[in-house]
Image: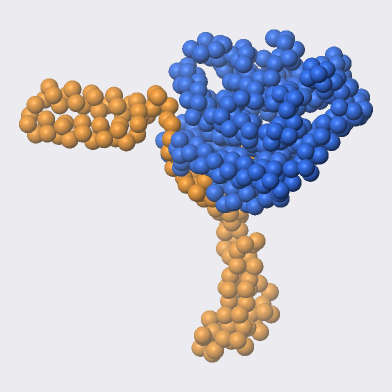
Amino acid sequence: MKCQRCPKPVSFHITEVIAPNQYEEVHLCEECGRKYLNEPFPVKATPPAQAVPSIPTEHAVNDPSAKQCEVCGLKFVEFRNSGRLGCPDDYDEFREDLLPLLESIHGDTKHLGKTPRRVPKPSAKKAELSQLRKRLSRAVSDEAYEEAARLRDQIKALEDYDQHS
Amino acid sequence: MNLDSLLPNLGEWLKGTGPESDVVISTRIRLARNLAHYPFAGRANLAQKTEIETRGRECLTQAQLPAPLPYVSVAALPTLDRQFLVERQLISRELANVLEGPRGVAFDERESVSVMVNEEDHLRLQVMRSGLALDEAWAEIDKLDDALEARLRFAFHEQFGYLTACPTNVGTGMRGSVMVHLPALGITKQIEKVFRALQKINLVVRGLYGEGSRASGDLYQISNQVTLGKSESRVLTEIREVIAMILQYERSARQVLIRERRQAEHDRVARALGTLGSATMITSEETMELLSAVRLGIHLQLVDNIPANLVNQLFIQTQSAHLQKLMGTVLDGEERNAARARYLRAKLRELDANSR
């Protein structure tokens, strides 16, 4: 490995702590290394001034415990502490963080079993939709426009139901 | 509703009848359900909780149900009445003492169906049966769920199923639970072994009053842990298979006791009856242990003058809140122990007089 400032071999491996959890590594030869350590501010490692305030923001985005549900306002960290979610929407809001948890509790992440009567069986509904779409394209290519219009309405009704449920 | 009218009854789960009732006390299935478009009860504000209670209550009175489920506001009940409902297994300890605000329970006259409102989840449906009756309990709670769902929109997710406040209940929201009496496995020190085997297949063992409660009087509740990824019928089948195994172990341990130490067992039962019939102070804990010995004695035919459901009656009536209701007054710890002993002496003397 060569020194980052000259062609001599490296003998100093310096890790600069820029912010909590943010580091920069500097690899220098003996001579450059001693110079580096005596410099008032590490020349290479000095982050641009505006980068400093941006660090906490980035940090917050990456930290799942700071996430918050837009519907009920529950923070993920609150769920961590209490073990209780705040509202049904949390399952989508925190989906990525809940999936490994569900996997470890239940060994699975997909419901099997009873569904409310008002919810059509998802597979049956999907099959029906794809069936209708096929018939629609056939009707269009056959120029059977009345049939096509009827099929389009049927498809729309099924899709609307899905969105409202 | 005057809860005192329930006092002389045993309730469904203590009837002492039903399949496999030599070992299985009762079967219970519960379903956790939440209304869509509301925060879960723990995060709902007072206005929302009031609205949830009103909607739940209206639905319970208007739904097409096989038996009416009159609603009792738990928030409005005195502490003693709340404890009384806990002892009868109609509400959880949390609903009674921990949670606050609008909440309650609806239950039928037979005490076989109950629906808690604003517990951890908006609705907690429960069906109880005497003995081992998972299929019957499921059929009934499934129908109850359908009847409520016809009037309420439950929070349901295409991938995650019924959504619940705690992710440990999400999916089916179902907990199937069988209460078993395992004194012979306790005496022959095999109980730990059985429970270790249960943990491997994801079933949980709990004490009499659910999560965190200590097992006493050799009573245990066996229930499923998994609610996501397995259908209700598959979970119930798994429980049924395990219970069949436990029944076999407990019965063969009982046979060993009879074969190898009949005299010692007979002595144990006689002493238990002796203490129950002559103590002047007795704790609920000790009462449960002695009644456990008597119950085993009945099934081993070591005693013949005691009806099996008397044990259940003594068991429930000597619980703190029941006792205080029977005595018609609030009692502190020592007074309770004295009152409990008085009640037991009187009951056993009555029995003696009848059998002569």
Quadrant containing the N terminus of chain B is: top right
Q: Depth check: A164 or A21 in front?
A: A164
Residue at 63% of width from left, 48% of height from top? B195
Q: From this viewpoint, which residue is outermost toward the front?
A: B356
Q: From this viewpoint, which residue is outermost toward the bottom?
A: A8
Residue at 33% of width from left, 26% of height from top? A160
Q: Quarter of the image holding residue A124?
A: top left
Q: Quarter of the image holding residue A122?
A: top left
- Judge from the rendering whether residue A144 lies leftward or rightward of residue B247; answer left or right: left
Residue at 48% of width from left, 12% of height from top? B64
Quadrant containing the C terminus of chain B is: top right
Q: How many marks?
A: 0
- Judge from the rendering whether residue B216 lies leftward or rightward of residue B199; answer left or right: right
Please state the horizontal and vertical placement of residue A12, each as a whole percent of the image.
62, 83
Q: Quarter of the image holding residue B97?
A: top right
Q: Is residue B315 above or below residue B251?
A: above
Q: Colour of chain A?
A: orange
**Residue A161 at least partly seen:** yes
- Judge from the rendering whether residue B97 lies leftward or rightward of residue A66; answer left or right: right
Q: How is the image coloured?
A: by chain
Please state the horizontal and vertical placement of residue A95, each as a whole percent of the image.
49, 44
Please state the horizontal and vertical placement of residue B148, each as a whole percent of the image.
50, 19
Residue at 56% of width from left, 35% of height from top? B175
Q: Depth check: B128 or A149 in front?
A: B128
- Judge from the rendering whether residue B297 lies leftward or rightward of residue B142; answer left or right: right
Q: Colour of chain B?
A: blue
